[in-house]
Amino acid sequence: MFKTQGFLSDQVSDLTDEINRQYPGLWSLSCEVNEFANQLQYSLSIHTGVPSELMGAPLYLRVLTNYQALLLLCKRGMLDQAYVTLRVPFLENVSSRYSM
């Protein structure tokens, strides 16, 4: 199934379960940060007369959605795509992960 559907297959859930087992504290913390940040967006009051708030609000949402995308990519085992989302230099990460 994975060979035909890739990361969209049902077999990815096995990988997701393994990641959750290997890093339970880290995954739990990541989800807590996401929950806090997601709830915070609804409690912010943006004043239209304050330019910094008008600029900051959409930037905050952009960071939040990128963080959520990063979590989804990591959870599905798509680490190279997660590095691209983080805009981390690709070759640096490849060399450190595969160094002998």
Image (cartoon, helix red, strand yellow):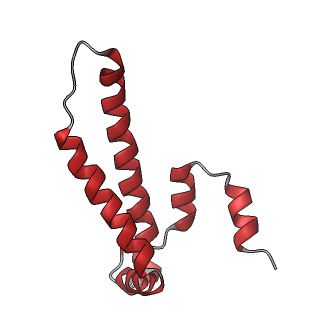
Q: Residue at x 30, y 22 (%)?
A: 54
Percent across and percent down for residue 38 are 25, 51
Percent across and percent down for residue 21 are 42, 87
Q: In which quarter of the image is residue 15?
A: bottom left
Q: Which residue lies furthest to the right in this view?
A: 100
Q: Which residue is drawn at 33% across and 15% down?
A: 51
Percent across and percent down for residue 12 are 39, 80
Percent across and percent down for residue 99 are 79, 74
Q: Residue at x 74, y 68 (%)?
A: 96
The N terminus: image quadrant: bottom left
Q: In this view, does 43 lie above or below 96?
A: above
Q: Is residue 35 above or below residue 6?
A: above
Q: Residue at x 51, y 59 (%)?
A: 82
Asked whether 43 or 57 is in front, the reply is 43
How many discs mark residues in the rendered view?
0
User: Left or right of 99: which side holds 72?
Assistant: left
Q: In this view, does 42 lie above or below 52?
A: below
The C terminus: image quadrant: bottom right
Q: Which residue lies furthest to the top in this view?
A: 49
